[in-house]
Image (cartoon, rainbow, N blue to C red):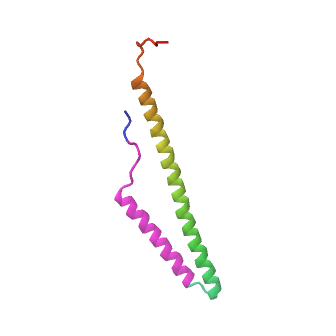
Amino acid sequence: METNSQSKSTPAFFVQAAASFGLSMVAVSVGIVYLPVGAWIRAFLAVGMLYLVTSAFTLAKVVRDQQESSTVVRRVDQARIDQLLTGHDPFKVPTP
């Protein structure tokens, strides 16, 4: 019987990913603030950055949902196969 083979991320990986995200957001924000351009251009870049961040979160969610969906389908298929195998008796004679 197959056990749950999904890999779990460690707390250290989660902290590293969160720190990397936070640092990149701060770096781009500081870059936009100190850019020698007008306020409208800064606002446009800030909105573009926020759009990029929300798009990245949406993409990550879609990829995760797709993976979870395929995992559930595999588990249901495996349960059906297990049920068929446990109910099968090769020595039973079918009665008409």
Q: Nearer the viewer, residue 57 or 83?
A: 83
Q: Quadrant of the N terminus?
A: top left
The kind of secondary structure the magenta stretch mainly shows is helix
Q: Nearer the viewer, residue 3 or 44?
A: 3
Q: Nearer the viewer, residue 50 or 41?
A: 50
Q: Position of residue 12 (x, y in %)?
A: 35, 60
Residue at 38% across / 42% down in the picture? 4
Residue at 48% across / 76% down in the picture? 26
Residue projecting furthest to the front: 96
Q: Position of residue 29 (x, y in %)?
A: 52, 78
Residue at 50% across / 54% down in the picture? 64
Q: Considering only vertical position in the picture, is 46 above or below 36?
A: above
Q: Position of residue 42 (x, y in %)?
A: 61, 83
Q: Is residue 15 magenta?
A: yes
Residue projecting furthest to the left: 11
Question: Is residue 45 left or right of 73 when viewed as pictured?
Answer: right
Q: Position of residue 56 (x, y in %)?
A: 55, 64
Q: Is residue 17 magenta?
A: yes
Residue at 42% across / 29% down in the picture? 83
Q: Considering only vertical position in the picture, is 15 above or below 39?
A: above
Question: Is residue 80 left or right of 42 when viewed as pictured?
Answer: left
How many numbered discs, if any? 0
Q: Which residues are magenta?
A: 4-33
